[in-house]
Image: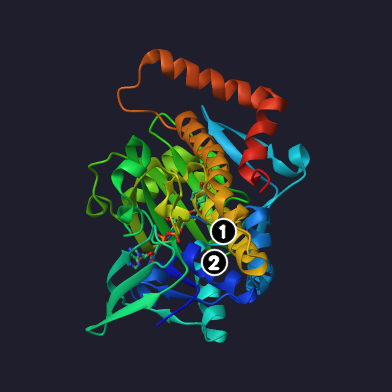
Amino acid sequence: MRSQVAIIGAGPAGLLLGQLLYKAGIDAVILEQRTPEYVLGRIRAGVLEQGTVDILDLAGVGARLHSQAMTHDGVEIGASGHRHRIAFKDLVGKVVTVYGQTEVTRDLMEARAACDAPSIYEAESVELHDISSARPWVTFVHKGVKQRLDCDFIAGCDGYHGVSRRSIPAAALSLFERIYPFGWLGVLADVPPAWDELIYADSERGFALASMRSETRVRCYVQCSLDDKVEHWSDEQFWAEFKRRVGEDVAARMTTGPSIEKSIAPLRSFVAEPMRYGQMFLAGDAAHIVPPTGAKGLNLAASDVFYLYEALSDYYRRESRAALDQYSGRALRRVWQAVRFSWWMTSLLHRFPGEDPFFGRIRGSELDYLFRSDAAQRSLAENYVGLPL
Ligand code: APR
Ligand code: PHB
């Protein structure tokens, strides 16, 4: 088997790259170790920057998003029992789109199936070979048969646990990591949101986030300890804790319901540099992880993929390697902006276990400054809606 590009992983990064390359007439095979159902079963964040929406449009998968997604002009930040609105549209003239990552993935999968481009699901034992040579190749086992895919380039879109980053010699990579000493317990439920915009709430009992997927579905989170287990939380306990944190007025008017999904996610910042080794390019979670507090994970995957698509198009159209050579530096610059913002939002809105009283006061003072200063609000807004591509 041969294709110009081998894409490892059919998460949003791999699928989006596949669609963009297809539109540019560059052929690619996607290898995914799981089933489509498994990929669609993962619940992740749901806030899209305008730049991400533009890239989805470029890939030709924006139709359902434009008819169904909600746009939000701001978010609310809760602290000390009060809520303050950060009015994105007034502050920086932009909005965000609220549309679940699962829906983005579904739209991409359907578009790929419709254009008959090859995706191989349940590809086991994927291995990358000769990635620093001009002729890399990939082997995998499908339905018990070992196969070989020859290609010009490999796009490592296989997430944090994937094989692509691990195929780079350790000495060629620099890794940066921060583990936060808490997790987020998330619940998805079919009840109408009692909030118009997302609420990020700091409280004495810990952080809570009120989000939504539609007019009839909410996604809510509470900060929990790292050794907590989903089984320890009944739906009733979750909602009781969420109500204590989100603010009395919201708690009083909200309806609750059985969870459709409940899971705990650890919070981590992680970056691998560079995002290229020879003919292999990393994109999305394979190269970096951000804590969900800034809603940047999917948006970063989209910007990486856009840069990589531009670079590969340049190579095939004009035989120019310049953009390929610039890919890692260009992507990492944007990645670090989002890593900084996500770290800042996380530090601002969470009580750290055993927090030093000095830092507690600094955190309180930073929140106070945010609520009183137009400049501070503009900075949050500018980052949240997305820095330019
Ligand atoms: N071989 C083939 N596929 C693999 C392998 C492997 N060895 N390892 C992992 N994969 C697949 C996974 O099963 C998954 O479907 O790669 C895909 C990676 O998808 P994601 O983890 O969703 O990563 P990405 O596409 O970069 O999406 C980034 O997801 O985690 C969120 O916050 C993140 O929203 C962001 C988005
Ligand atoms: C979500 O809706 O799941 C969500 C929204 C915003 C975040 C994180 C998660 O910052």
Q: Quadrant of the N terminus?
A: bottom left
User: Which residue is depicted at the point 35% across and 16% down?
Assistant: 356
* Image location of residue 199, percent across then percent down: 55, 43
Instruction: State how far apart marks 1 and 2 are (Cα).
Output: 8 Å
Q: Quadrant of residue 223?
A: top left
Q: Is residue 247 visible?
A: no
Crowding around mark 1 (Cα neighbors within 10 Å: few <14, some 14 to 19, many 20+) is many
In depth, the one of 142 and 215 nearer the eye is: 142
Q: Is residue 55 above or below residue 322?
A: below
Residue beneath disc 2:
17
Q: Quadrant of residue 302?
A: bottom right
Q: Is residue 102 above or below residue 1?
A: above
In depth, the one of 336 and 279 nearer the eye is: 279
Horizontal placement of 127 versus 54: left or right?
A: left
In contact (CB < 8 Å): disc 1 and disc 2: yes
Dot 2: element: helix
Residue beneath disc 1:
308
Q: Amino acid at mark 1?
A: Leu
- Sequence-first disc among 1 and 2: 2
Dot 1: element: helix
* Image location of residue 12, percent across then percent down: 49, 64
Residue closest to the far top? 358
Horizontal placement of 371 versus 185: left or right?
A: right
Q: Is residue 201 above or below residue 132?
A: above
* Image location of residue 288, percent across then percent down: 43, 47
State whether label 1 is within 8 Å of ligand 1.
no
The mark lying in front, picked from 1 and 2, is 1
